[in-house]
Amino acid sequence: MMPETRPRVLTGAHFINGDIACAEGALAAGLGLFAGYPITPSTEVAERLSQRLPEVGGRYIQMEDELASMAAVLGASWGGVRAMTATSGPGFTLMMENLGLGVMTETPCVVVDVQRGSPSTGLPTLVGQSDVMQAKWGSHGDYEIVAYSPSSCQEMFDLTIKAFNTADRLRIPVILLADEVIGHMTERVVIPEASKIERVERKRPASAPGNGYHPYATDNDLVPPMAPVGEGYRFHITGLTHDEKGYPVTDAVTHERLVRRINEKVLRQASSLCEYEEASLDDADIVVVAYGCVSRSVRRAIREAREGGIRVGLFRPITIWPFPGERIRELSAQAKAFVVAELNLGQFGRELERFTSKPVVGVNRAGGELLPPEPVLAAIREAASW
């Protein structure tokens, strides 16, 4: 690592955009390596880190494409450093094979996806929220992922730190599922003192280096300890189905046990991982669900509906995955309808329908523009008339 020449944590109040807040959050979390390929609207994350990482002893590398970027991140993580990449929809798609490798090898890392209009090249400079399902199901196989959705520049900073801590605690890739509006808007971001920033360390082997180390042996939390490459521990890393020693095994029992464990270690933590914000829900019989930039427009729609006598409130999922299904079930007991507003054709809304028998009204847009309050207000009034 290179020597530090500037502070890693820029404590104080700053007026910065969301992408830069994300970069500073990564630095505050202890980022050691960023590997990526420039892509709008996430490029400012890479640009900032290309300047700042060398100043704090870290490494920045621009790879030839997103496949290689994800591979470099996984390799750096096994080297013992916190590693991250940032991209948008098309690049996120290219990363999916190696995201699956990260799941199978239980490699902690952070992937930032600043979403734009899609599919394909789509609308590179305009907003979208169409990677919700890709974040969960983009790679092949059965696995559980954690994805956070920021709705402010402050949350871009805070949730980046949380993403690293979750990744190291559970030994999984974690996704920061942002959007172009939040990435490019500029707001006040307060960065605390370094001593007040939480850092969750990876579980380390209890034994000294030697032939007895089993890299995938676990205890009650189902998360195996992780020894960095180069410290004398001998082990094998593979994307193939493997036993506790890390070596390939092709029988059904081993595969079943492995896949169930890498799912269960996340599912067991679902209640603590699911974070959300609620506003005006105490007496609400209509619940508006929105995340990311759309939640900002929804607040105005709710305020105007309340002024008109409609009992409506906001449910803003901060954790997109695991899906906050249990809370949706609880809200269904009081709600007569849900309104789900998002910048896609109904991805989060379709998942929500699995957890409620109440009507779900989708307010959807895919044109690359921020959803204004008016169509949300119209949907609220429609639901209130039932």
Image: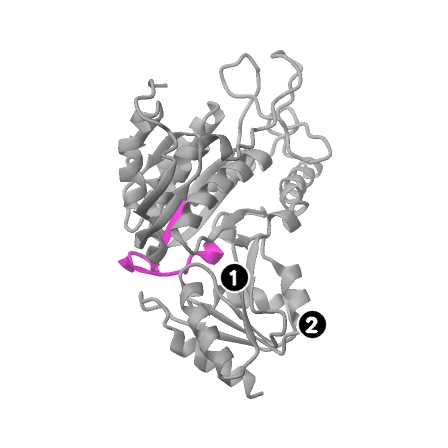
What residue would you read off at disc 1?
Answer: 316
Question: Where does the C terminus fall, quadrant-wise?
Answer: bottom right
For the image shown, how many numbered marks are present on the structure?
A: 2
Secondary structure under badge 2? Answer: loop
Residue 370 falls left or right of residue 231: left
Q: Looking at the picture, does residue 262 appear above or below residue 152? A: above
> Is the residue under label 1 in contact with that under label 2 (CB below 8 Å)?
no
Secondary structure under badge 1? Answer: strand
Question: What residue lies at 65% left-to-right and 68% top-to-bottom?
Answer: 331
Location of residue 225 (image quadrant): top right
Could you tell me the amino acid type at mark 2? Answer: Ala
Q: Looking at the picture, does residue 36 appear above or below residue 92? A: above
- Which color scheme did the rendering employ for the protein? one colour
User: Which residue is at the front of the view, 353 or 295?
Assistant: 295
Residue 152 drawn at (x, y percent): 41, 54
Query: Which stretch appears magenta?
Result: 112-134
What residue would you read off at disc 2?
Answer: 333
Question: What residue lies at 69% left-to-right and 36% top-to-bottom?
Answer: 221
- Neighbours of disc 1 within 10 Å: few (<14), some (14-19), many (20+): many
Question: What residue lies at 52% left-to-right and 54% top-to-bottom?
Answer: 318
Could you tell me the amino acid type at mark 1? Answer: Arg
- Neighbours of disc 2 within 10 Å: few (<14), some (14-19), many (20+): few
Q: Looking at the picture, does residue 75 appear above or below residue 189? A: above
- Marks 2 and 1 sit apart, C-alpha to C-alpha, by 18 Å
Name the residue furthest bottom: 385
User: Which residue is at the front of the view, 328 or 223?
Assistant: 328
Can residue 44 be spotted in the picture? yes
